[in-house]
């Protein structure tokens, strides 16, 4: 996706993205053009032919997209080369914004994994990544033999970044490895939650294809399960139960009126990325709303549960437990209705290689309905979910 060569018709969209979303300084258009591979003569012509910096930037991008001068030698007209050019100019924050727009899976990794110290579990992690073909045997050996401590950890982080650039599924594989290491269990939960959210966004935006997949690498073994419209009723019932639970948690919290500062601290320690949004929350209910919006889904209420347990709101904890019990029963019902146990068993494949299940829809759920169905399917299957429309 990221290595794909962009087209000349993309010039206006890229211009607007840089200026409006990524805070690009228009007066640096010439420096950007130079980093992208345009020569001085071309840049002089652009300056001569245009009256404003915005027009110069648009013309510069057009020349870049037409692969003028030395553009191919600088990586071609790709999102990668544009982001690298931004970083070479010192616009690290803006380049990160561009990554979030066009490389969301890499942004998830950098936001949540960049500061990890993997040295203690280095050998086990590298062995798993090599087995899953995320990193090569030669790279694994060189890191094992020539480095130690933090140097090895940093080298592994850099290798993972490159792997995720090539294929987003490397992030999912890394998260599954973290799951086996107790001190990284929370990081694994967050990574997979954000990973699945980005996959859902891609599936929802892809209306031009007959099928949409949640993984860029085709898994070695796939099982296809038809999904009828009846699943909508089941997920709607779960959604209603979820809404009731959230309301009861807020009502129970209102009775206790917990200290806002303590609530903020609990959330901020667990989710440092929410620090700026927490500053805009002045009441306990606004903090609970933030938790529900940013951290929860039908199948993941761990953060909400953590907070109410820490501030000892017994009634809220009981409401959450009742919801979890209802959710588990509903998922068992959905699994049985989809005949998953028998279908997976009939595949007769090694569970370590059986990475994904394809759910076949002859109808198209939209918006929140699709997100709910997708999340529930992940929970009931315990595998990567691939959605296919027929």
Image (spheres, rainbow, N blue to C red):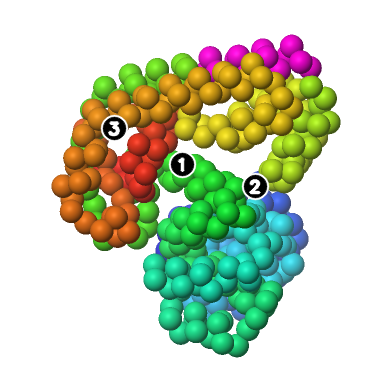
Are the residues tagged 2 and 1 within 8 Å (C-beta)? no
Q: Give residue 8's position: percent from left, percent from top.
A: 46, 60
Nearer the viewer's eye, disc 3 or disc 2? 3
Q: Give residue 186's position: percent from left, percent from top.
A: 60, 48
- The quadrant in which the C terminus is found is top left
Residue 326 appears in view:
yes
Q: Residue at x 81, y 32 (%)?
A: 262
Classify residue 333 by image quadrant: top left
Marks 2 and 1 sit apart, C-alpha to C-alpha, by 18 Å
In this view, 175 is above or below 305: below
Q: Give residue 151's position: percent from left, percent from top.
A: 67, 78
Mark count: 3
Tell me where the magenta segment starts and ends, as one range: 242-257
Are the residues tagged 3 and 1 within 8 Å (C-beta)? no
Classify residue 368 by image quadrant: top left
- Residue occupied by mark 2: 21
- Residue occupied by mark 1: 201
Q: Tell me the crowding category of disc 2: few under 14, some 14 to 19, or many 20 or more residues within 10 angstroms, Cα based.
A: few
């Amino acid at each position: 996706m990221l290595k794909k060569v962009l087209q000349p018709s993309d010039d206006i969209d890229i211009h607007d993205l840089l200026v409006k979303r990524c805070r690009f300084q228009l007066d640096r258009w010439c420096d950007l053009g130079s980093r992208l591979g345009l020569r001085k003569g071309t840049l002089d012509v652009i300056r001569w032919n245009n009256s404003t910096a915005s027009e110069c930037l648009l013309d510069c991008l057009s020349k870049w997209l037409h692969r003028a001068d030395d553009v191919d030698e600088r990586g071609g007209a790709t999102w990668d080369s544009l982001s690298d050019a931004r970083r070479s100019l010192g616009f690290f924050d803006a380049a990160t914004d561009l990554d979030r727009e066009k490389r969301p899976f890499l942004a998830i990794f950098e936001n949540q994994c960049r500061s990890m110290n993997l040295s203690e579990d280095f050998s086990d992690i590298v062995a798993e990544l090599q087995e899953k073909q995320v990193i090569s045997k030669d790279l694994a050996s060189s890191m094992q033999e020539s480095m130690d401590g933090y140097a090895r950890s940093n080298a592994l982080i850099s290798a993972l970044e490159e792997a995720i650039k090539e294929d987003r599924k490397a992030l999912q594989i890394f998260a599954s490895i973290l799951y086996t290491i107790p001190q990284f269990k929370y990081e694994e939960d967050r990574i997979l939650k954000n990973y699945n959210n980005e996959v859902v966004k891609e599936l929802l935006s892809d209306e031009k294809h007959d099928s949409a997949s949640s993984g860029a690498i085709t898994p070695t073994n796939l099982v296809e399960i038809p999904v009828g419209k009846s699943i909508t009723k089941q997920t709607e019932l779960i959604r209603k139960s979820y809404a009731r639970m959230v309301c009861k948690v807020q009502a129970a919290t209102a009775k206790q009126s917990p200290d806002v500062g303590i609530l903020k601290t609990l959330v901020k320690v667990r989710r440092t990325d929410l620090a700026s949004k927490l500053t805009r929350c002045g009441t306990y209910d606004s903090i609970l709303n933030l938790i529900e919006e940013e951290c929860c889904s039908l199948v993941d209420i761990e953060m909400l549960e953590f907070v109410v347990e820490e501030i000892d709101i017994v009634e809220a904890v009981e409401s959450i437990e009742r919801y979890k019990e209802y959710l588990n029963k509903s998922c068992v019902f959905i699994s049985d209705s989809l005949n998953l146990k028998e279908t997976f068993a009939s595949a007769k494949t090694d569970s370590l290689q059986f990475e994904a299940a394809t759910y076949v829809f002859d109808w198209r759920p939209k918006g929140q309905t699709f997100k709910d169905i997708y999340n529930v399917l992940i929970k009931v299957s315990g595998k990567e979910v691939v959605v296919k429309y027929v």
